[in-house]
Amino acid sequence: MNKKWFLVIIILFCGCFYWFFIRNKQKKEQSKEQPITLNKHSTAFNDNINKVINSYLSLKDAFIESDTNQIKTKAADFITAVNQIDTLEIKKDSAAVLETIMATITDVRSNAESILNQTDITEMRRDFSSLTEMMFPVFFNAIQYEGPTLYLQNCPMAFNDTEPANWISKTKEIMNPYMGKKHPKYQSGMLNCGETIDTIKAK
């Protein structure tokens, strides 16, 4: 065999080795990489949901201040934000999913509207507790939440010093909306009472 053919065979061997061993190995390594996460919803839909969350957080802050006028204002803002959720996008989902989401939105709105009908701040706080229970996990699961990380927090003595209640916060810092800054018994002494019990993350 002359040198020319020997060289051709060597080149073919190297090419086959690269193709079947090195290139295939690179493909396998690439396939192990995490896929890029794609949003399930449009930017507009997620903006609507973020407005709902921010309105809820503002309502929570009004309870911390124990300001009934502000509570009613923020509850009204929350209802407005809920009413602006893009239901046309939701209707792209299956009938079962659509029914679940629409029922959840109705329940969330109803709990917020109940706050507007109260005059006693303790009763307002009970409605806020019910609203929170509808928000997490039901609402977040139904809409397949894609926003920033939030925290579910708990006060073990929200009502009558024995009944627990939850709220949602954007930070791990405990600022208790059920005790607030002007509690009739504790004043601001129990403002930091509570703990984080869960994390709410994008689905």
Image (cartoon, rainbow, N blue to C red):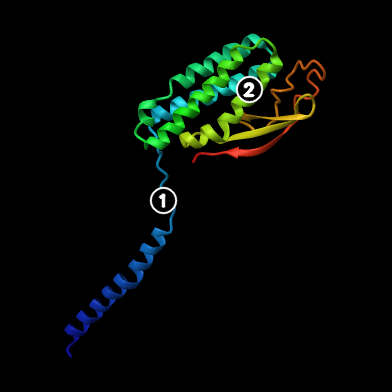
Q: Residue at x 70, y 26 (%)?
A: 175
Residue 88, quarter of picture = top left
The mark tally for this picture is 2
Q: Residue at x 66, y 11 (%)?
A: 68
Is 80 in front, or is 15? 80
Residue 180 x %, y %: 73, 20
Quarter of the image that includes the N terminus? bottom left
Is 73 in front, or is 189? 73
Q: Which residue is mark 2?
A: 128
Q: CA distance from mark 1 to mark 2?
A: 39 Å
Relative to residue 126, is residue 73 drawn left or right? left
Q: Which residue is mark 1?
A: 35
Identify which amino acid the numbered label 2 is placed on: Phe
Residue 24, quarter of picture = bottom left
Please rate how many residues cluster around mark 1, counting C-alpha atoms within 10 Å: few if below 14, some from 14 to 19, many from 20: few
Identify which amino acid the numbered label 1 is placed on: Pro
Relative to residue 141, is residue 26 drawn left or right? left
Residue 164 x %, y %: 72, 30
Is 191 above or below relative to 118? Answer: below
Q: Is residue 8 visible?
A: yes
Please rate how many residues cluster around mark 2, counting C-alpha atoms within 10 Å: few if below 14, some from 14 to 19, many from 20: many
Residue 173, quarter of picture = top right
Q: Is residue 148 visible?
A: no
